Image (cartoon, rainbow, N blue to C red):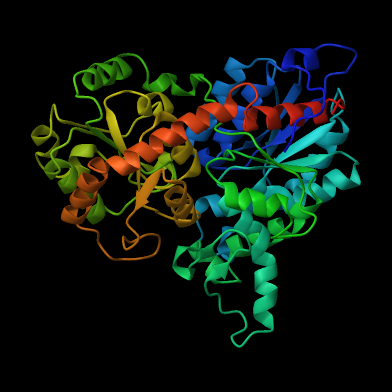
Amino acid sequence: MAPPPAMQSPGELDGGAYDAPHVLFIPSAGIGHLTPVFRVIAGFSSRGIDVSVVTVLPTVSAAEMDYFNGLFADYPGVRRVDMHLLPLDASEFTSEDPFFLRWEALRRSVHLLRPIITNAAPRITAIITDITLTSCVIPIAKELDVPCHVLFPTAATMLSLNAYYPGYLEQLKGGPAPGVVGDVDIPGVFRVPRSALPPALLDVNKLFTKQFIDNGREMVRADGVLVNTFDAVEPAPLTALRGGKIVPGYPPVYTIGPLKSHATKAGDKAGGAGDALLDEWLGQQRARSVVYVAFGNRSAARLDQIREIAADLEACGYPFLWVLKTTKVDREDDAELAEVLGDGYLERVKGRGTVTKGWVEQEALLKHPAVGMFVSHGGWNSALEASSAGVPLLVWPQLGDHRVNAMAAVSAGIGAWAEHWSWDGEDTLVTGQDIADKVKEVMADEKLRASVAVARKEAAKAVAEGGTSYRNMHDFIAKLKGVA
C-alpha cells in the first residue's frame, strides 16, 4: 500500500483545521482479541483522535476487566461506554466454548449499539469493530452512514481463510460430497489441510462456524481491515487479499503490526516483589538458555497432560519459566500449584525452574537476553511478540486458529511445529519425552534462530518511520481525518 504523494508527518496530521475524528471501538471477548484493540487505542492517543470504547459487561474473565480498568487508568482521555449484555440462554447450545457463547451474546445485544452511536457527542465519525461482531455491526454502521472498519486480531493467513471459506462451502454444495469439509486451497496462499482447520469449521451447524461464515461474507462491505501483522512475515496472503485473488473487491487491508505494547495498570496485581524476583532469577541465567512456556489465556490442558509437560521441563536440562493455567476462565482457576504438579515437584525444580499462575509481562520477558525459546499455543499476538524479540517458537496449537497460525509461523521461518501433537478435542497424550526431545531440537536449531533474527529486523523496520506498517497506520489515520 503506497503512501500518498505528499505524506505529512503524524504531527502535521494532528494540527491544522481538521476536526478531531471520534472513533468508537467495539471490542469482543478474550485477551487475544482485546490486546490488539488496546494497542491501537494507545497508538491513537497521541495522534489527535477522540476515542470511545464500548465496555461490555460483565466480562468473561477477571483478566479482561483488569485490562479495561488499566486502559482507562492509563488513558483518561478515552471515553468508557458501558453496555450491559442481554441474558443469553446457553441451554440452546451444547458444549460450547464460554468465549463463543460470549460472542453470540454480543451479537444478540448489538442493537443496543444504535443509541450509543446516534447519541454520542461529539458525533461518531468512524467505527472499528472486532471481527467476531462484523456481520452485526456493519449493517448498523451502513444504516447510520458511519464508516466501519474491522480489526482482525490474528494472522493475515487466517484472514485469507475467513475471506475464502464462505465461497468454499458454496462450492461444496455442488460437489460429490456436499457439506463434507476437506483440505482448503486458498488461492494465492497455500493449502490448509482439514486437520489444521479450527475443529468447529468442520461442522456447518456449529455456532462458531455460523459466526465465521456470516462475518466472512460481510467483510466485503467494510471500509477497511486492520491486521496486526507485517508485510514481510506474511507476503502471500496479503498479496492475495489485496489483489482480489481470494475475493474480488475486498476492502483495503492495512498491516499495522507488530503493534507496540503499552504499560497498563492491569499488570499491577502481579507487580512489585514478584516481578523483581523474576527479573533477578532471569538475570542469573545464561544467555538464550531459558525455555519460556505459556499457552495463552484461553488454553487449559488436562491434568495428565500438565504433568507430562512438568516431566519434560524437569528432564530437559534447561532453566524454565512456565505460566500455568488449569481452566479456560481465570475466575474458575482455584487450583494450588503443588497439588496440580504433584508432590515435591516445585521443590525438585527450585532454582532451575519457575512456575506461576500469575500475570507475566510477556513482551518484556521475551526481550530478556536469557530467554532462548518460547513454547506457545500459537496465538498470533504471542507469535509476533516472539519474532519481534528474536525468540524462536515451538508452536503447540491448542484450539481455534492455532494450527493455521502455526502454518504461518513455519512459513515465515519464525517457529517450528510438532504437527502430530494432539490439540482441541483429541485425547492423545503427548509424553514428556516427546516434548523434551522437541525442546532440545528447537534450542539447538541455529538455522531457525538465524531466520528469527531476520524476522526481528524486518519487524523493527516495518514499524520504523517509512516502514510498511508505519505508512499504513499513517494512511489509515489520514483517512479517518479526511486528509488522505
Q: Is residue 20 above or below residue 58?
A: above
In the foreground, 101 or 257: 257
Q: Is residue 364 above or below residue 87?
A: above
Q: Residue 455, how many percent across, how many down?
A: 46, 36
Residue 336, quarter of picture: top left
Name the residue at 58% across, 27% down. 463
Left/right placement of residue 9 relative to residue 131 reads right
Q: Is residue 434 above or below residue 428?
A: above
| Residue 416 in view of the camera | yes
Q: Residue 172, how many percent across, how many down?
A: 64, 78
| Residue 94 in view of the camera | no
Residue 420, quarter of picture: bottom left
Name the residue at 40% across, 54% down. 398
Image quarter hosting the C terminus = top right
Left/right placement of residue 170 relative to residue 67 reads right
Name the residue at 59% across, 40% down. 231
Residue 175, quarter of picture: bottom right
Q: Residue 270, how many percent across, how many down?
A: 37, 22
Image quarter hosting the N terminus = top right
Q: Residue 434, how many percent across, how many down?
A: 20, 56
Q: Tag count in the figure? A: 0
Name the residue at 12% across, 44% down. 315
Left/right placement of residue 91 relative to residue 366 reads right
In the foreground, 83 or 152: 152
In the foreground, 240 or 337: 240
As drawn, which residue projects farthest toward the bottom? 176
